[in-house]
């Protein structure tokens, strides 16, 4: 007899019913990413550290960047704040890069009537989530050892990350469906990823954003998610429940709309491919 979660309608029920398949494809994505390399899984740790070193040299030392959230902020604190932002941005950047081609790259699954195609974009999200988990683990270790130390507000971090997951899933489903019919989307998402990086205040405090620009960027859930994570992990500021609620609401709307768009387009995938 199916569990209560398995009887749920819509995307949540679909993911739960096919959770074992989702797990297998997630493992496959993670293994394929470093297949054939000598260091293998170690690259999952080295890549964020190498990117962090580059950005700290450019924005921390050359441009003297600071977030000025505490009077005693050091370059190491700035580096940790950068790594939080880069970890969350890379999570979405990986989805933007993979999702538009995830269905096109697997035509053999499209032709199998019984295969749940929604698992392919969801597995891409889960593998990206794994890499974000590694990066954020490095952040927590850094804050505990060379940063200001950990506090009880760290417990908010899993909540913030979970609030980002429905947004990522909805975006992945939407891009996966659109990528079947409009192949140029895959060329645009790389540029949009760079735009998103600068629109999410990864390298600078959001307080320096001009009011006219802030009037638009304040609706960017990624910016709010990064700021919430920094407040919880690094700066020990109170977590804004209003911003967290907005993040959850935006994620749920995207979650259901993205799934609806994917299911609507799925019957035509085989004909297009």
Image: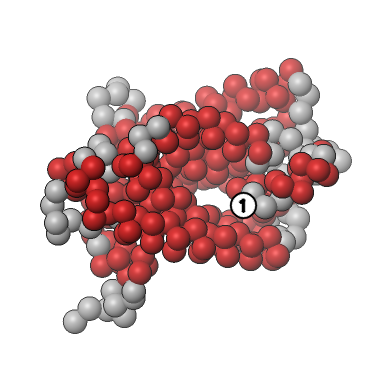
Identify which residue is drawn at 26% across, 29% down.
35
Going by the image, does 68 lie left or right of 255? right
Which is nearer the eye, 187 or 121? 187
Q: How is the image coloured?
A: secondary structure
Callout 1: 10 Å neighbours few (<14), some, many (20+)? many
**Residue appearing at x 48%, y 42% in the figure:** 91
Location of residue 243 by image quarter: bottom right
How many numbered circles are shown?
A: 1
Q: In which quarter of the image is residue 56?
A: top right
Residue shown at 81% from the left, 43% from the top = 212
Place of residue 5 in the rendered image (x, y in percent of width and height, measured from the top left): 33, 75
Please state which of residues 231 and 94 is positioned toward the viewer in this rendering: 94
Q: In this view, does 54 lie to the left or right of 257?
A: right
Q: Where is residue 179 in the image (x, y as percent from the top left)?
A: 36, 41
Q: From the viewer's perspective, is residue 263 above or below residue 12?
A: above
Relative horizontal placement of residue 9, taking residue 158 as reference (left or right): left
In the picture shown, does residue 53 fall above or below 26? above
Residue furthest top in the image: 62
The secondary structure type at the circle numbered 1 is helix
* Residue 111 in sight from this viewpoint: yes
When the figure is inspected, residue 52 is found, relative to residue 3, above or below; the finding is: above
Q: Where is residue 222 drawn, in percent x and y?
A: 60, 48
Residue 36, relative to residue 167: is it above or below?
A: above
Residue 80, visible in the rendered structure: no
The percent coordinates of residue 248 (x first, y second) are 57, 63
In the picture, which quadrant includes the N terminus?
bottom left
Residue located at (65% from left, 41% from top): 200
Disc 1 target residue: 221
Quarter placement of the C terminus? top left
**In the figure, is residue 8 to the left or right of 221?**
left
């Amino acid at each position: 007899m199916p569990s209560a979660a398995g009887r749920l309608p819509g995307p949540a029920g679909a993911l739960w019913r096919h959770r074992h398949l989702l797990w297998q494809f997630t493992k496959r994505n993670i293994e394929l990413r470093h297949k054939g390399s000598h260091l293998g899984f170690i690259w999952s740790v080295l890549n964020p550290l190498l990117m962090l070193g580059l950005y700290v040299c450019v924005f921390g030392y050359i441009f003297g960047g600071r977030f000025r959230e505490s009077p005693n902020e050091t370059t190491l604190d700035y580096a940790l704040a950068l790594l939080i932002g880069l970890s969350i941005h890379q999570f979405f950047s990986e989805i933007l890069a993979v999702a538009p081609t995830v269905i096109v790259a697997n035509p053999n699954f499209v032709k199998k009537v019984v295969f749940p195609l929604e698992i392919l974009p969801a597995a891409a999200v889960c593998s990206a989530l794994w890499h974000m988990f590694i990066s954020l683990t490095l952040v927590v270790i850094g804050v505990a050892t060379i940063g200001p130390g950990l506090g009880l507000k760290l417990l908010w971090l899993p909540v913030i990350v979970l609030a980002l997951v429905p947004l990522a899933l909805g975006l992945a489903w939407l891009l996966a469906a659109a990528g079947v019919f409009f192949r140029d989307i895959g060329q645009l998402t790389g540029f949009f990823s760079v735009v998103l990086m600068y629109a999410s205040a990864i390298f600078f405090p959001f307080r320096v954003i001009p009011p006219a620009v802030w009037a638009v960027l304040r609706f960017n859930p990624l910016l709010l998610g990064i700021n919430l994570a920094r407040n919880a992990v690094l700066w020990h500021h109170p977590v804004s429940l209003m911003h967290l609620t907005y993040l959850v609401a935006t994620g749920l709307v995207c979650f259901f709309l993205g799934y609806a768009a994917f299911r609507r387009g799925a019957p035509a995938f085989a004909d297009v491919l």
